[in-house]
Image (cartoon, rainbow, N blue to C red):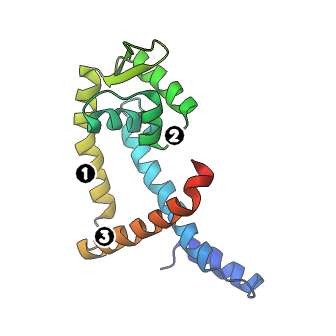
Amino acid sequence: MEDVVAGVVRQWQRERPDLDLGPMALIGRLNRCSALLRQASDALLGEEGLTRPEFDILAALRRVGGELTPSRLARETFASGAAVTKRVKVLERDGLVARRADDRDRRVFHLSLTGRGRELVDRLLPEQLALEAALLSGLAAERRDELAAALGELLVTLEGRLGGLLG
């Protein structure tokens, strides 16, 4: 059985045999896997009225165990400041995030989870992890570990090369 990217690569090999399609094979599969994983995750979170980026905000606040400024939250969630501001407004409106003005500088504010926000993350995280485990269950544990290590190497490489361009 052939994955969809293999079919695309095969077509390009026929049309342009002079090109090295190795990068397309790898990045195409990463993109396709990302899209499928996002789709599955979005379905679970959508049942709670959340988007993945909104859940990422809540999860970041939960895992640091305290308050974060919007700029630090942007770094933690790999999002722009404008995107964080938009998401925080929704989460604050829904009673999941609280905003507190800084004692020294009123232009700065700190964000934290409300009790309701913390309960939601604590309930959803095990469900999210169970979904992810089920999605990966077709791979042996050793293969998952190898894949995670290889992707970690790729991530470090990309962050080194692109960090300055994208940061």
Distance from the alpha carbon under mark 3 to that under mark 1: 15 Å
Mark 3 sits on what residue? 144
Extreme residue toward the bottom, this view = 17
Residue 92: image quadrant is top left
**Residue at point 28%, 20% (across, down):** 114
Question: Which x, y percent locates residue 9?
Answer: 64, 78
**Residue indicated by mark 1:** 130
Judging depth in this view, the residue of 151 and 45 nearest the camera is 151
The earlier-in-sequence mark between 3 and 2 is 2
- Quarter-wise, where is residue 52 in the image? top left
Neighbor class of circle 3 (other Cα within 10 Å; few <14, some 14-19, many 20+) is: some
Q: Give, as a three-letter code, the residue at label 3.
A: Arg
What's the mark number on residue 79?
Answer: 2
Q: Is residue 137 left or right of residue 81?
A: left
Residue 163 x %, y %: 55, 55
Q: In terms of depth relative to the viewer, which is nearer, 40 or 166?
A: 166
**Image position of 4 with respect to 106: above or below:** below
**Disc nearer the start of the sequence (3/1):** 1
Instruction: Write down the quadrant of residue 62 in the picture.
Output: top left
